[in-house]
Amino acid sequence: MTAVPTLPALSEEARGLATGTAENPLHPEHTPTGQLSFGVFFQGVNSSTVWRSERSGSQVAWESFETLIRTAERGRFAAFFLGEGLRLREHRGVPLELDVAGRPDAQTLLAGLAAITESIGLVATQNTTYNDPVDLARRLQTLDLLSGGRAGWNIVTTDNAWTGENFRRGGYLDHEDRYVHAEAFVKVAQQLWRGEQIDHHGQHYDVAARGTLPRSAQGEPVLFQAGASPAGQAFAGRTADVIFSPHGTLAAAADFRRSVVDATIAAGRDPQAVKILPGAEIILGATDAEAEEKRIWVRDHQIGPQQAIALLEQYWGRDLSDFDPDGPLPDVEPEIEQSDVTRGSGFQFAKAKELTAAWRAEAAEKGLSILEFAREKSGARRGEFVGSYDRVADRLGQFAALGAIDGLNITPWLIPSGLDDIVDHLVPRLQERGIYPTEYAGTTLRENLGLPPVQG
């Protein structure tokens, strides 16, 4: 049974962000639940996971996935997320050897994990651009049935030609059309899950089909969406059950909550309909000093000298190997006008000349070397909670009390033991504060996220 929350009094920071009443501190139509849910995000290909250490496990071995999901379920995590990589990251035209490379197929792996777990949700990141809606919907529905109603779909869109080359149709989707395409895709999937007759004639494909599988215990898979742009928020407001966000500060999370609620209301849905789970990294210690020492170790092992140079080369578009990682940022102009997506979506649409000039000025002002700057930028791309067990628990209590978030989607900095401190030390403190479940609310992912039953 979930503990009845005793919400902490709002801190001075939180009070300064509240714009409404005690019951609706951030938005007049949104009431905080005071509860938090955790998900764990096994990315597989990234610069946030420490993999150059003897403490690191394999990123593709079954034992790593099994250990991590068992720990998460012991900690009453609502969901286990898998990322998707449709093409290996590259650096200057060749596969990048400085990131963890390769990801097993998400749905195959989650079907196996369903057999060794009982309550935790199983969420597959799946792309609307390079799948067909009926085929993908049937596979997701199968996972939902096999797991007893625990499946989720993290909806992502891709329109770049580099990824599309793997599918012999690269670049066929205009960037402005990515959510138009995705929304039609999702509607077809939902029609299939509900056993409806599908007769879709749209801009990108035609579909004539009918669902043949029974509905799962939760009705249909939970829909997650990660777009934080205005178009992404509007799409989430119309379709999603849960939205991810890159906002780790309380102020940014408060603004994002208001924006998402507005998008949800504009779509004609209940203001409480969309849960927000920001991506986060949590580094803990028995004391603040111990946590800070661990943070330094983590940063040192996440981004090394070679990775720092490679990061800058993506934006400069030229060989920077002659520059000292412990020296200042390169004083040469970039050779490209705009960076590309070969190392992931975070590199898209950055105007190289303007960005590199701003970075040089920022690094000089802060007195940061290439290596120090790269580590700072890498950490800034995700929310960060660092401190003693009690300090982080108190901090999360403020997020819950203000209603800025509904939980966190945690990226462990170490596989497979990166959740141990969180489950063993942070979760009990959150439970003592009444803001985190002591038991699962039910048997389905929808129940454990506090979502209402499916309508339709």
Image (tube, helix red, strand yellow):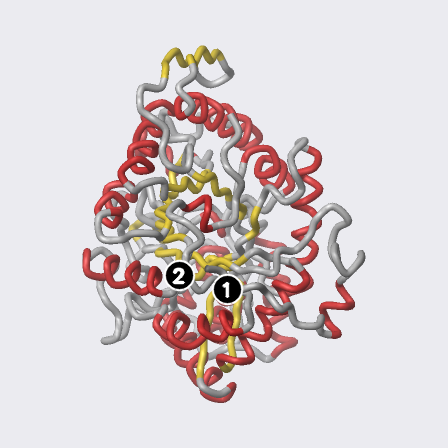
Residue 26: quadrant of the picture: bottom right
- In the depicted structure, whether residue 94 falls above or below residue 178: below
Q: Is residue 209 left or right of residue 428?
A: left
Q: Position of residue 45 (x, y in %)?
A: 34, 55
Q: Which residue is mark 1?
A: 436
Point 51% across, 46% down: residue: 226
Q: Across the whole image, how many numbered discs are drawn on residues?
A: 2
Return the x and y of residue 289 as percentages of the image width and height: 50, 89
Please state which of residues 402 and 330 is positioned toward the viewer in this rendering. 402
| Residue 30 or residue 1, whichever sits in front | 1
Q: Tell me the residue that label 2 is attached to.
A: 76
**Rendered position, 232 above or below 365:** above
The part of the image, by quadrant, that contains residue 321 is bottom left
- The residue under the point 44% across, 46% down is 341
Question: Is residue 443 placed above or below 402 in the rendered structure?
Answer: above
Between discs 2 and 1, the one toward the N terminus: 2
- Please, what is the three-letter code of the amino acid marked with disc 1? Tyr
Q: Is residue 283 above or below residue 318?
A: below
Give amino acid for label 2: Arg
